[in-house]
Image (cartoon, rainbow, N blue to C red):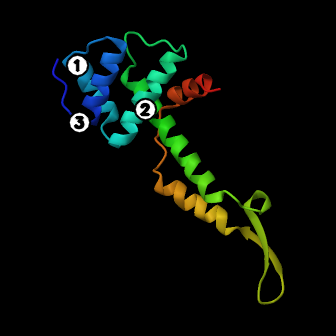
């Protein structure tokens, strides 16, 4: 089966070579349909994630299926968003990312600190979370440590 040389095709060729498996045109179509809206760098990082999971003992037969690859994409996005938030809030001295301030009338209020807001901006720039069906979310939470 000929696989196009785009991110999905390259990732699929990488997975097929790693797992020593082949796919037919219907399988390629299923992968393309499931992963069409996902950025290329996420797709390749998710393929690496699947290979790491297989090396750690997770069984794929004969290779990761489209929903499993999409689940890995969601995990990659989630990790990137968490890392971006941590980067934006590193070195923050405010407990719970809250700070006190007084308004013009002298009334004391609390608000989110600038570190938190910067972290949220970086998190948003890292991408939107990938929506998965509830069944996949349950399965993903069971497989994470």
Please determine whether, in this image, residue 115 is positioned above or below residue 72. below
Residue 95 spot, x, y in % from top left:
80, 59
Say which residue label 3 marks.
6
- State which tag comes first along the sequence, 3 or 1: 3
User: In the structure shown, which secondary structural element does the residue marked by tag 2 occupy?
Assistant: helix
88 on left or right of 35? right
Say which residue label 2 marks.
46
Contact flag, marks 2 and 1 (Cβ < 8 Å): no
The Cα–Cα distance between marks 3 and 2, rounded to whole angstroms, is 15 Å
Say which residue label 1 marks.
26
Please determine whether, in this image, residue 22 is positioned above or below residue 50. above
Mark 1 nearby-residue class (10 Å; few <14, some 14–19, many ≥20): few
Which quarter of the figure is the C terminus placed in? top right
Which quarter of the figure is the N terminus placed in? top left
46 on left or right of 142? left
Which residue corresponds to the image point at 25% horizontal and 29% vertical from the top-left? 9
**Identity of the residue furthest to the left in this view:** 2
Residue 93 spot, x, y in % from top left:
77, 62
């Amino acid at each position: 089966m000929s696989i196009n040389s785009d991110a999905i095709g390259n990732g699929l060729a990488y997975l097929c070579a790693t797992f020593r498996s082949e796919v037919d045109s219907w399988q390629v179509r299923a992968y393309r349909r499931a992963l069409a809206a996902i950025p290329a760098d996420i797709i390749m990082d998710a393929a690496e994630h699947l290979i790491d999971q297989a090396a750690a003992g997770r069984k794929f037969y004969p290779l990761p299926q489209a929903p499993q690859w999409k689940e890995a994409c969601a995990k990659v996005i989630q990790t990137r968003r968490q890392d971006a938030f941590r980067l934006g809030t590193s070195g923050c001295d405010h407990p719970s990312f809250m700070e006190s301030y007084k308004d013009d009338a002298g009334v004391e209020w609390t608000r989110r600190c600038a570190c938190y807001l910067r972290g949220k901006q970086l998190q948003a720039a890292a991408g939107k979370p990938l929506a998965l069906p509830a069944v996949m979310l349950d399965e993903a939470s069971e497989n994470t440590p």
